[in-house]
Amino acid sequence: MTVAPVLDIRNMQTVFRIGGRDIAAVTDLTLTVEPGETVALVGESGSGKSVTSLSILGLLPKKVGRLAQGSVAFRGKSGETRDLAKLDAEALRRVRGNDIAMVFQEPMTSLNPVYTVGEQIAEPIRIHLGRSHREAAADAVRLLADVGIPDPERRARQYPHELSGGMRQRATIAMALACNPSLLIADEPTTALDVTIQAQILDLLARLQRERGMAMLFVTHNLGVVAEIADRVAVMYAGRIVETGRVAEVFAHPRHLYTKGLLRSVPRLGEASALKAAGTPLPTIAGAVPSLSNLPAGCSFAPRCPYAISACSAAVPPLTDTGDGQLSRCIRWQEI
Amino acid sequence: MVLALSVLVFILLRLAPGDPIDAYVNPASPLSPDAMQALRDRLGLDAPLPVQYFGWLRAAVTGDLGFSIQRVGVPVLPLVLERIGPTLLLMAAGLAIAIVVGITAGIISAVRRNSPTDIGFSVLAFVGISSPAFLTALLGLYFFSVQLRWAPSGGMLTPGAGFSLGDLLAHLVLPACLLSIGHAALIMRYMRASLLEVLNQDYVRTARAKGVREFFVIVKHAVRNALLPVITLIGSTIGIAVGGAIFIESVFNWPGMGLLLVNAVETRDYPVIMGATLVIGATVIVVNLLTDITYAAVDPRIQVA
Ligand SMILES: Nc1ncnc2c1ncn2[C@@H]1O[C@H](COP(=O)(O)OP(=O)(O)OP(=O)(O)O)[C@@H](O)[C@H]1O
Ligand code: SF4
Ligand SMILES: [Mg+2]
């Protein structure tokens, strides 16, 4: 790629202060998102996907969570690149909802129950673009139409409880797109929805992204969704990215045993059909995710890994280029 | 509800020992037993209780609350009505102070959770809730009126001085503040807890993610939601505020319903007690209705029927 990435995170570490001790929820995270590209962040519950998203925007819980190391270079709409990790609170606030917007998992609770949908969409337009109440309200109606909500004038005047779950998620997407951000962070935007609605929301996000040339960081634990929406994927385990690469390549030949395990636990993907043909039950990954306060030395996946050898626990394996820009933290990637 | 209250008060009154005639008669010149019986007959005090009650009720629905026993010839209704203004004024002032102070302190405490300010406010609230009303009223009267002479020690207006707003306010401030203490403390604690909970809600995070200024995240997005349970609390403490007002009125000689009621109870002036109770009950119900309307105005999920 010749164009510089929109988002370029290097060696980011995020810690939580728990019981007087700093516990790293995200460690040595390096990740880039190119303009117009969708990068999926996948991993089991607790692997640090949401913490990564919140760290980028400086939305970590005050006094408890802190971006302790690394840089988050971000190129905003103005074309200027800044390190978000070094911005003060006020400068960061001006980035949020303007250059980088976020869509959250729970459409039921992400909207404020006491304000109309239209008002909530208009708010960032007034804050960041300096529009009048009237202009922003008109923009909000247009955005609601853009995200496929019928009768947008009426919906804009309604309160969140008057909308269905799918409709509310469309409204939060409209709110996120209000200021035409160059990066959209979507943290499991479809997890809480019915399967049919999920597909609609995914299609909507894909269409909006195409139309606006916006980059997207898409957090999910659903590999089917990754296959559908993402160009590249980063697999997280216990606060680290263990493998990253183009979706087609990672899915076709994973270079980390955790990725391989994940793919094997998903039907339709990986070797599911082959396994069924052979009469073998679908494997899930045995064992549990280690606690962040008590991570095993070396490769965090070693206790659950069928290939683990003593060298795996000697030191944390570095991200190694396995060819074609695919990176893996597995020392035995060549044998997989 | 007012009806049930009137039945209850009626029965309780008659179960209580004592007789209005005893209180009425000047002990220095006792009446003959015959004269006392005649008085009883005239007042209908010997009729069976249900007869007495329904007689009262029939008249009450037409707006006739009867006559005071102790102040011969004085009808109850105007007596009660002339007292309701001062009581409402005192209660409204007390509650207004409690709401402003309680909500402001609650917000500051929640936003600066675990800071010295928060701890200070919480200690004050604890003291405010746990100190008995009679103690704060008497101590307040003693310090501010008697010792410091900052405020007049009683009444609503300086006698013979004619009406002036300043004079009224000077008389009002101390009893209203003392009345507000317990409520302010309670409201502060509710507001703090409620706001802390709201600040953890997803929509507050959404507001921050939109780039809303922290001040407006609190004031616009969080406080309005946090107020909902506090409004309910305020509505449900109105009854307690009435009790507090009655007490404060007798300490500060405030010419309201409370003072009227206390005097009436002392002299067993049944019609006055019944009339005052009725009006107080109706007031509480109206205020509760107002609270419900306020709630519906703040929360769009509630449909006003
Ligand atoms: N507010 C917090 N205080 C302390 N620790 C936290 C906090 N938020 C997250 N963590 C820690 O960070 C870890 C990663 O959490 P995160 O929410 O990023 O997981 P996730 O990958 O998004 O999982 P999920 O799929 O469940 O959303 C958690 O295991 C938790 O221990
Ligand atoms: S480094 Fe070792 S333990 Fe970790 S995934 Fe590779 S083989 Fe398994
Ligand atoms: Mg998450």
Image (spheres, coloured by chain):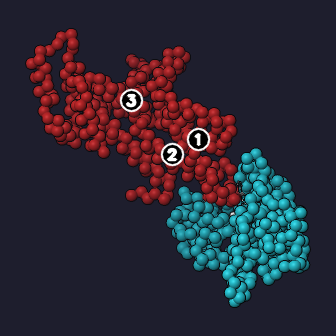
Chain colours: A cyan, B red
For mark 3, does the 10 Å Cα neighbourhood hold few (<14), some (14 to 19), or many (20 or more) residues?
Answer: many
Q: Secondary structure at mark 3?
A: helix
Q: Are marks 3 and 2 on the same chain?
A: yes
**Seen in the image, is B87 located left or right of residue A49?**
left
As displayed, is residue A112 above or below residue B191? below
Q: Do residues under tags 2 and 1 come within 8 Å of each other at their CB atoms?
A: yes
**Seen in the image, is B36 located left or right of residue B138?**
left
Q: Amino acid at mark 1?
A: Gly
As displayed, is residue B174 above or below residue A83? above
Residue A94: x and y, percent? 75, 57
For mark 2, does the 10 Å Cα neighbourhood hold few (<14), some (14 to 19), or many (20 or more) residues?
Answer: many
Residue at image position (55%, 75%) is A150
Q: Return the residue at label 1.
A: B106
For ligand 1, tell me if the residue under mark 3 lies within 8 Å: no
Spatial CA span between label 3 and label 1: 27 Å
Q: Are marks 2 and 1 on the same chain?
A: yes
Label 3 marks a residue whose chain is B
Residue B180: x and y, percent? 49, 33
Residue at image position (14%, 35%) is B48
For mark 1, does the 10 Å Cα neighbourhood hold few (<14), some (14 to 19), or many (20 or more) residues?
Answer: many
The label shown at residue B246 is 3
**In the current view of this chain or complex, which residue is farthest to the bottom?**
A277
Q: Do residues under tags 3 and 2 come within 8 Å of each other at their CB atoms?
A: no
Q: Return the residue at label 2.
A: B230
Residue at image position (61%, 61%) is A110
Residue at image position (73%, 55%) is A60
Residue B18 placement: quadrant: top left
